[in-house]
Each structure stands twice: as C-alpha cells, then as structure tokens.
Image (cartoon, rainbow, N blue to C red):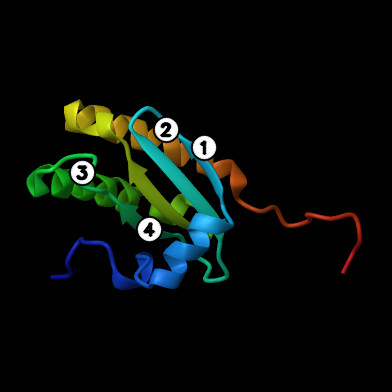
Amino acid sequence: MRAAGLPREARLRRAGDFAALSHASGRFGGRCFSVRYRNNELGHARLGLAISKRVSKLAVERNRIKRLVRESFRRIQHELPAVDLMVLAREQVVAMSGNQLLAELDALWAKLKPLKPTEATGTIAR
C-alpha cells in the first residue's frame, strides 16, 4: 500500500530554492497565510513551508498548521501550474479551526490557478 503523503519531489528542500522565492517571486495572501510563488521548469508544483516560532511557541500548533497545509496542497497539486510555492503563516492562524484554514487555503490555491501558462503566449510564431 502506497503512503498518501506528500512525495519528496513535490517539496522544496534546498536552501537555494527558498532563497530564490524570497528574492524573485510573486506573492499574494489571505488573512492567515501569505504565499510566494515562482515558475519552475519541472512540470509540477512544489511546496515549501515557513512556520516560525513567532506564529506559536508551541511545536504542536506549528506542526498542526504544517499538516493542514500539506494535506490541502496534496489534494490539489495536480491542478496547479508548474510553480514553486512557499507558504508563510501569520500569527492569526493559531486561533482558527482546521476547517477555516482549509477553506482559506483552497481560496489561495484558486488564485494561483489562473497563472497557468497558455499555449500561445506571444505574438511571434516560433
């Protein structure tokens, strides 16, 4: 039986990937999360998480947030364009219920879907 977790190739793991997102990327956000994104050449979306101790001093709460974000991403990753994503949590996230957080994440993923490139992006035929 195969695990239903987030596969290794769907995660940002290197410090260079996170640094690239910090410097040259687009961003948008909601009440509890901020998302940075950057196109990649891999053909699929990858997720990175930045949940700091400023959000909560308790590791249990930070891990809960990470699990919710990963699960939300895992469900929708095949519908997303080929981008690297870094999700940052804000301090308000701790007070929200799991269903509210999942609803906000779904709204954030919906903002990302229109960024999918179209076939003919320019005026010059190649």
Q: Which residue corresponds to mark 3?
A: 65
**Where's residue 66, x and y in %?**
22, 49
**Crowd band around label 3 with a 10 angstrom C-alpha radius: few (<14), some (14–19), many (20+):** many
Earlier sequence position, callout 4 versus callout 1: 4
In the picture of the structure, the residue carrying the numbered disc 1 is: 111
Q: Residue at x 37, y 66 (%)?
A: 12
Circles 1 and 2: CB atoms closer than 8 Å = yes
Q: How many marks?
A: 4
Q: Nearer the viewer, residue 8 or 38?
A: 38
**What residue sits right under mark 2 in the picture?**
107
The amino acid at mark 4 is: Leu
Image location of residue 98, percent across then percent down: 18, 33
Q: Nearer the viewer, mark 2 or mark 3?
A: 3
- Secondary element at image label 4: strand
Q: Using the numbered discs, state the Cα–Cα distance from disc 4 to disc 1 in whole angstroms.
A: 16 Å
Q: CA distance from mark 4 to mark 2?
A: 16 Å
Q: Nearer the viewer, residue 54 or 9?
A: 54
Q: CA distance from mark 1 to mark 3?
A: 20 Å
* Amino acid type, label 1: Lys
Mark 1 vs mark 3, foreground winner is: 3
Which label number is shown at residue 99? none
Q: Which residue is mark 4?
A: 47
Q: Nearer the viewer, residue 64 or 19?
A: 19
Q: Position of residue 101 (x, y in %)?
A: 27, 33
Distance between the alpha carbons at the discs numbered 2 and 3: 16 Å
Q: Are marks 1 and 3 in contact (CB under 8 Å)?
A: no
The quadrant in which residue 93 appears is top left
Quick check: 111 above or below 45? above
